[in-house]
Image (spheres, rainbow, N blue to C red):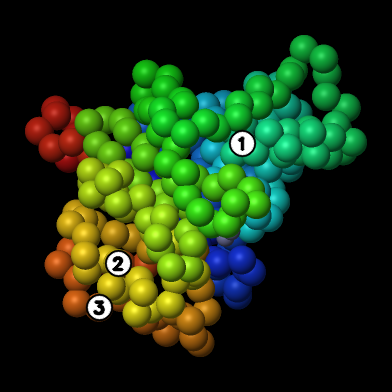
Amino acid sequence: MKITFLGTSHGDPTVDRYNASFLLEAGEAGYLFDCGSPATASLVRLGFDFGRLRAVFISHMHLDHCADLPHLLKHLVKHKLKPRACLPDPAAVSPVDSLLRLAYPVPPDLEVTYQIIEPGRFFSDGSVSVTAVPTDHGRGKFPSYAFLIEGSGKKILYTGDLAADLSDFPVEAAQAADLCICELTHAPPETMEKKLRSLSLKRVIFTHIGPRYEKDGALTLPQGLSFPVSAARDGDTVTVEQRGIPGIA
Ligand SMILES: [Zn+2]
Ligand SMILES: [Zn+2]
């Protein structure tokens, strides 16, 4: 599986970070995780073939994670593709679909499939499966999820946004994962360090980088951890593959 980070900022874009989104590729199939702006334009700039996009998964409906979704759906429909949007909240379907149809006359035979995310494994297409782990980022006001992505014999955990006290950190899924893609905004540095030090993880890449961790381009990452950590930048790619399979490094 190959990941390309399209946007690695927190709630606001910065001069060098767009809002939250990453592309996951497994063979010929592509999947988009969160769709902060300007994810669609970023995919075009990458030269991505939108016909490969199997689904887009939204962790929660904060706009830094979903503002570009109507634009993406419009792009797919316009090019006669049939998008699947996996949304965390049933209340999101109507406004997203209304905005799409307001902006673009969707032909009746080109329906968008909206799938409401439920806790547990909710998506599997033979290439990857995605399991939703509820988080408490919404503090009971709206649903939010972490995603455990499984494919090519490997597991990747994406935390989405978390509660500031990290009481909702998806510990079990993260410890099972070969790579944890972790948000770095809501928890204070001491809380994040304490939580991570208590865990046995294989590798962490931070994204959704908040201002208390990055000032004037200088990053301060959690220290004293027993596993490798790094911070993604827009455009970074990382490959997570099963060793020993012919043709795969
Ligand atoms: Zn966010
Ligand atoms: Zn959020």
Q: Residue at x 46, y 25 (%)?
A: 123
Q: Is residue 178 above or below residue 14?
A: above
Measured in 3D between alpha carbons, the distance from the residue under mark 3 to the one under mark 1, in whole angstroms, is: 35 Å
Give the number of the disc on residue 195. Answer: 2
Quarter holding the N terminus?
Answer: top left
Q: Is residue 78 above or below residue 218?
A: above
Q: Is residue 20 above or below residue 25?
A: below
Graded by Cα atoms within 10 Å as few (under 14), some (14 to 19) or many (20 or more), the crowding at tag 2 reads: some
Residue 56 position within the rendered picture, expressed as x and y whole percent measured from the top left: 56, 36
**Residue located farthest toward the front when viewing the structure as drawn:** 140
Measured in 3D between alpha carbons, the distance from the residue under mark 3 to the one under mark 2, in whole angstroms, is: 12 Å
Marks 3 and 2, the one that precedes in the sequence: 2
Amino acid type at circle 1 is Leu
Amino acid type at circle 2 is Lys
Give the number of the disc on residue 41. Answer: none
Q: Residue at x 34, y 79 (%)?
A: 190
Element carrying mark 1: strand
**In the image, the residue with mark 3 has its CB under 8 Å from the nearest atom of ligand 1:** no
Give the number of the disc on residue 87. Answer: 1
Residue 79 position within the rendered picture, expressed as x and y whole percent measured from the top left: 71, 27
Give the number of the disc on residue 223. Answer: 3
Amino acid type at circle 3 is Gln
Contact between marks 3 and 2 (CB within 8 A): the answer is: no
Q: In this orientation, which residue lies closer to the viewer: 139 or 63?
A: 139
Q: In this orientation, which residue lies closer to the viewer: 126 or 189?
A: 189
Foreground mark, 2 or 1, reads: 2
Marks 3 and 1, the one that precedes in the sequence: 1
Residue 194 position within the rendered picture, expressed as x and y whole percent measured from the top left: 28, 73
Measured in 3D between alpha carbons, the distance from the residue under mark 2 to the one under mark 1, in whole angstroms, is: 28 Å
